[in-house]
Image: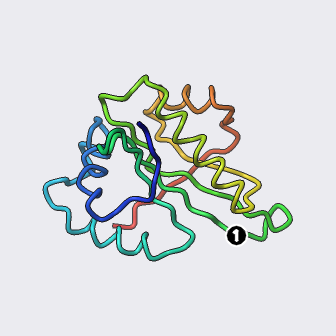
Amino acid sequence: MLTIERARAEDVTAIVAMLADDPLGAARETPEDLTPYLKAFEVIDADPHQHLVVARRDGRVVGTLQLTVLPGLSRTATTRAQVEGVRVHVDERGSGLGAKLMEWAEGQARERGCALLQLTSDLAREDAHRFYERLGYAGTHLGFKKRLT
């Protein structure tokens, strides 16, 4: 049975393992030292605008994403939601779990009064781009990032 529920501190190890389980993540994640991730989890968990969730199949963490609700003034004071860190365990890829996670995110965003659901995806993740396009997302904006550390 599959459930999608709020992540707990004990899920951080599995979440970080999924974040590190691809060429991009392997170069930027440090699963051998969970200290910064556990600190970040505490901040995320305490913020009512943050929704870090895991998908569990038979008790095992098999997917994750983070949904952030962003109130704003633009677009006639539209509240939007941002999806980050979508990951599916290698054993579950191609099973439809990613679509279920995004469907969950869309439903939660609607429940919280969001009129727009947005995400960014690394340019190198071409398979992910096709996945999001199949779900109805459009690449309407160009995203920019600047490393501060």
Q: Residue at the spot x=34%, y=69% of the render?
A: 40
Q: Residue at image x 73%, y 58%?
A: 114
* Residue farthest toward the right in the current orientation of the protein: 76
Instruction: Please say if 105 is above or below 1.
Output: below
Q: Which residue is drawn at 67% across and 44% down?
A: 141
In which image quadrant can residue 82 be found? bottom right
Image location of residue 103, percent across then percent down: 60, 40
- Where does label 1 land, which residue? 71
Q: In which quarter of the image is the C terminus?
A: bottom left
Answer with the quarter of the image where residue 129 lies: top right
Give the image location of residue 74, x and y in percent: 79, 65
**How many numbered marks, from 0 up?**
1
Give the SS element for disc 1. loop
Tell me residue 117's x, y (percent). Answer: 67, 50
The residue at 68%/35% (across/down) is 138
- Residue type at mark 1: give it: Pro
Q: Is residue 110 left or right of residue 57?
A: right
Q: Which of 44 and 95 is in front in this view?
A: 95
Outermost residue toward the top in this view? 94
Q: Which colour scheme is used?
A: rainbow
Disc 1 crowd rating (10 Å Cα; few below 14, some 14-19, many 20+) is: some
Q: Which of 36 and 50 is in front in this view?
A: 50
**Horizontal and vertical percent position of residue 58:** 33, 39
Quarter of the image containing the N terminus? top left
Q: Quadrant of residue 63?
A: top left
89 relative position to 111: left or right: left
